[in-house]
Amino acid sequence: MVMERVIITKNKLMEILEFLETVTIDKIIISDHFIIRNTEEHLNKIYADTEIYKRLLTKEYPLEISIQPFDKIRIKYKHPYCDKYDFCIVFTRENKKIKLITTFNAPTRKRTGRC
């Protein structure tokens, strides 16, 4: 199965940024997949602390935003604990809420082009 590349337009980007500005902590839903992925596969304090996700999504400005198939949104933030990685959060929008799908670290070199 080949995944179709999704292009983000300026209007879509502005829509996402405006949506993030309106999100409050009580509008962030944690999916079952998110809980499983972050407790079983990532026994690390960054993954166990859901307050970090909420703070990033409601208070920090993203480094990069991309739209994935099935209307998933991936946002990269400066990693709260490490300069070698960016911190990625994948979520979907459900009504006026965010449903967290997964998170992962991405090497900063992917974004900056440095070795």
Image (cartoon, grey):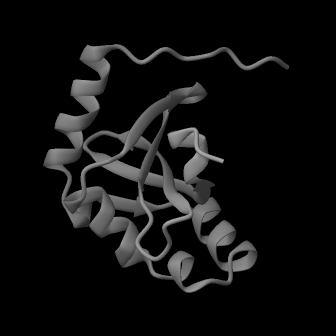
Q: Position of residue 49 (x, y in %)?
A: 46, 81
Q: Position of residue 115 (x, y in %)?
A: 66, 48
Please give left or right for residue 75 compared with residue 111 in the image: left
| Residue in the image at 30% along x and 57% along y | 57
Q: Position of residue 95 (x, y in %)?
A: 30, 39
| Residue in the image at 35% along x and 13% along y | 9
Q: Which of the two residues, 4 or 100, is positioned nearer the viewer here?
A: 4
Please give left or right for residue 65 compared with residue 109 in the image: left
Please give left or right for residue 83 compared with residue 28 in the image: right
- Where 76 falls versus 45 (above or below)? above
- Where 68 falls versus 8 (above or below)? below
| Residue in the image at 37% along x and 73% along y | 52
Q: Which of the two residues, 69 or 31, is positioned nearer the viewer here?
A: 69
User: Residue 51 is drawn in which quadrant?
Assistant: bottom left
- Where 79 falls versus 44 (above or below)? above
- Where 53 falls versus 62 (above or below)? below
| Residue in the image at 67% along x and 14% along y | 4
Please give left or right for residue 64 compared with residue 14 in the image: right
Q: Position of residue 34 (x, y in %)?
A: 59, 63
Q: What is the residue that sits farthest to the right in this orientation?
A: 1
Q: How many discs appear?
A: 0
User: Where is the N terminus found, in terms of image quarters?
Assistant: top right
